[in-house]
Amino acid sequence: MKTCPTLLLGPLAASAQSLAPAPLSDPWLPPAARSASLAPAKQGAALQAQAQAKLLKQFQAADSLGRQALTVDEARRAGFGFAVRNFEQIDSERRGEIRIQDLQRFLALQAAREAAKQEIQR
């Protein structure tokens, strides 16, 4: 008696497909970060908003006394190297501490200077 191999393998093939391994994912990536909707913005206002939010979060974490200001020592301990190097320029009012607004103003000024320099080179 002849049997058709597809008749014998049909149910087996269907169950084998259900046992196929799931696509590989990075086991070190937290589940919340695996969502495609949480992908970082690549340009424009969304990227600017993400950068500002990250800067504010880091600033608040570095503010050990909760005064909404950083001394040069707090900035150094927090790893704000650019703030430490440019502390005198950022602290334009010579208070001995910088606020987030001072830091944002300094960064905006630096970005404007860089944009003007790029424009001149064109």
Image (spheres, rainbow, N blue to C red):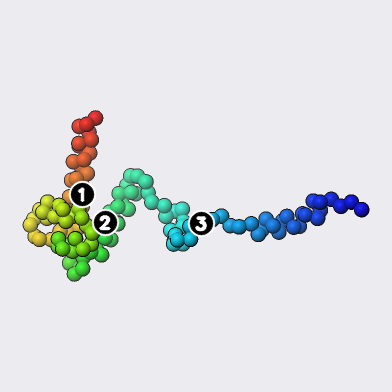
Marks 2 and 1 sit apart, C-alpha to C-alpha, by: 11 Å
| Three-letter amino acid code at the position of disc 1 | Leu
Mark 1 neighbour class, 10 Å CA radius: few under 14, some 14 to 19, many 20 or more: some
* Image quadrant containing the C terminus: top left
* Mark nearer the N terminus (1 vs 3): 3
For the residues labelled 2 and 1, say whether their Cβ atoms are less than 8 Å apart: yes
**Residue 101: image x %, image y %?**
18, 55
Dot label at residue 25: 3
Can see residue 102?
no
Of badges 1 and 3, the one in the foreground is 3
- Classify mark 2: helix, strand or loop: helix
Q: Which mark is residue 74?
A: none
Query: Which residue reaches farthest top?
Result: 122
- Residue 119 makes an appearance in the image: yes
Give percent across and percent down for residue 44: 33, 44
- Image coords of residue 115 (percent x, y): 22, 39
Q: Which amino acid type corresponds to the residue marked 3 in the rendered image?
A: Ser
The residue that label 2 is drawn on is: 55
- Residues packed near mark 3 inside 10 Å, few (<14), some (14 to 19) or many (20 plus): few
Looking at marks 2 and 1 on the same chain, the residue that comes earlier in the sequence is marked by 2
Numbered label attached to residue 107: 1
Q: Nearer the viewer, mark 3 or mark 2?
A: 3
